[in-house]
Image (spheres, grey):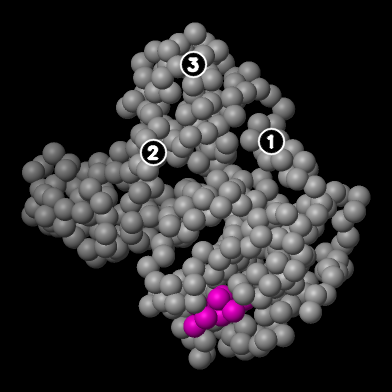
């Protein structure tokens, strides 16, 4: 089943029944009456047509979203539904193999990745997506264990994985590999590749408030950032043009992966029902409550650098950094950071974002944070103090 529309409290029907059944399977909703009064078959499953998205479902969905590092809104749209479907799989439930263009995704894949990493086989980070790196690590494991190296995780491979205990200690292998890769790349920005993702675009204008549109604001900021990076010798790519339409996060991630970039920077502005909400926040791929420890260490570090520089140089309220499992952050093979640069629904933030000088400061902050990411500790300087060459 593919979830196309968004379901929330008060909705009814077969799709809601499907949502409820998945929440029951995950232990987030007790099995029992979950239909309107007078419906159901008495076995705790109820009638599909009358299944209700009630307060208990809303609470369970919010809890699940928090667990999976998604936006907590109690609404089941395509992304939340995908995560619900992925969460039901356990290692051994199905055969696992790499399929070009249609990778297998699920918690069973995340378990496989974690076990491979624990035994010293490099499959990249734990993201629950069976891509080419995971297949290579699986084949290497099979070869070392004397199994057929078909890259398919079937009964014999499941048994072998169950027999072997953790053999790697002293830290997360992927985190150490990312750190080493960062160190080897050198301190200079020249020669590096960065993908800049101005959010929304075309008919999707994002947040519209106080005479500003999110798509226009982040496009302008992206061009300023592109210019500064190019002047420093960085190859910068934009995920969309000025009037591009219909570019989803999966397409943007695929574009970034095709460039083999070192880093992805996604630019957005935020909204809130309260006009008092304000400030800047930065996001990286990760979830502290996830039992697999899914995270991008480099992304987390870069998000913290961006956040500190933006707060120091622009005066925006510090909304801190947060791990999220949003599609773009998760599906890029390289570290990615999403920056929510103020709230357009806040009059003061909007007034700042409207100004050319503020946008210049914001672009400079991001470039300085990028430079600090690659500097060795003994060459770094305090937040807000590093200055880069000015090119005209």
Residue 1 seen by the camera? yes
Question: Which residue does the numbered mark 2 point to in the structure image?
Answer: 100
Residue, far bottom: 211
Instruction: Report, in whole angstroms, how far the alpha carbon at label 3 lies from the one at label 2.
Output: 20 Å
Q: Secondary structure at mark 1?
A: helix
Q: CA distance from mark 2 to mark 1?
A: 25 Å
Q: Which residues are magenta?
A: 213-221
| Lateral position of residue 53 relative to residue 119, left or right | left
Q: Residue at x 68, y 48 (%)?
A: 298
Image coordinates of residue 31 in percent, x first then y, are: 25, 41
Residue topped by disc 1 = 177
Residue 378 in the image, given as x and y percentages of width and height:
91, 50
Q: Main secondary structure of the magenta part?
A: helix
Residue 61 inside the magenta-drawn segment: no
Q: Does residue 277 appear anywhere in the picture?
A: no
* Residue depicted at 68% across the width and 24% down the height: 169
Give the position of the C terminus as an image quadrant: bottom right
Residue shown at the point (73%, 54%) measured from the top left: 191
Q: Kindly report the distance in space between the C-alpha atoms of the residues bearing marks 3 and 1.
A: 22 Å
Q: Residues within 10 Å of mark 3 (few under 14, many from 20)?
A: many
Image coordinates of residue 252 in percent, x first then y, are 47, 59
Q: Is residue 342 left or right of residue 234?
A: left
Q: Is residue 150 above or below residue 62?
A: above
Residue at 49% from the left image edge and 86% from the top image edge: 209
Location of mark 3 (residue): 142
């Amino acid at each position: 089943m593919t979830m196309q529309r968004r379901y929330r409290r008060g909705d009814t029907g077969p799709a809601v029944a499907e949502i409820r059944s998945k929440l029951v399977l995950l232990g987030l909703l007790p099995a029992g009456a979950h239909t309107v009064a007078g419906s159901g078959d008495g076995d705790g499953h109820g009638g599909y047509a009358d299944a209700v998205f009630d307060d208990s479902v809303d609470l369970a969905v919010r809890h699940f979203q928090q667990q999976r590092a998604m936006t907590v809104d109690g609404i089941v749209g395509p992304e939340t539904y995908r995560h619900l479907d992925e969460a039901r799989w356990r290692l051994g439930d199905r055969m696992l193999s790499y399929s070009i263009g249609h990778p297998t995704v699920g918690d069973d894949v995340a378990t496989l990745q974690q076990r491979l990493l624990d035994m010293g086989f490099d499959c990249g980070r734990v993201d629950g997506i069976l891509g080419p790196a995971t297949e290579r690590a699986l084949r290497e494991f099979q070869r070392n264990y004397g199994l057929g190296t078909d890259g398919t995780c079937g009964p014999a491979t499941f048994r072998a994985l169950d027999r072997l205990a953790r053999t790697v200690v002293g830290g997360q292998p992927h985190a150490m590999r990312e750190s080493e890769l960062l160190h080897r790349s050198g301190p200079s920005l020249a020669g590096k590749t960065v993908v800049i993702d101005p959010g929304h675009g075309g008919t999707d204008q994002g947040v519209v408030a106080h005479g500003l549109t999110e798509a226009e604001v982040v496009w302008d900021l992206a061009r300023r950032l592109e210019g500064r990076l190019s002047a420093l010798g960085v190859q910068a790519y934009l995920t969309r043009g000025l009037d591009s339409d219909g570019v989803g996060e999966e397409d943007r991630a695929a574009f970034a992966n095709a460039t083999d970039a070192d880093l992805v920077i996604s630019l957005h502005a935020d909204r809130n029902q309260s006009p008092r909400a304000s400030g800047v926040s930065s996001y990286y791929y990760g979830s502290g409550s996830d039992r697999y420890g899914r995270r991008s260490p480099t992304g987390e570090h870069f998000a913290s650098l961006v956040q500190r520089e933006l707060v120091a140089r622009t005066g925006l309220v510090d909304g801190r950094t947060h791990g999220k499992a949003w599609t773009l952050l998760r599906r890029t093979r390289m570290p990615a950071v999403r920056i929510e640069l103020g709230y357009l629904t806040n009059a003061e933030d909007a007034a700042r974002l409207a100004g050319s000088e503020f946008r210049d400061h914001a672009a400079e902050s991001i470039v300085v944070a990028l430079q600090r990411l690659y500097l060795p500790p003994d060459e770094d300087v305090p937040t807000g103090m590093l200055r880069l060459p000015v090119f005209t």
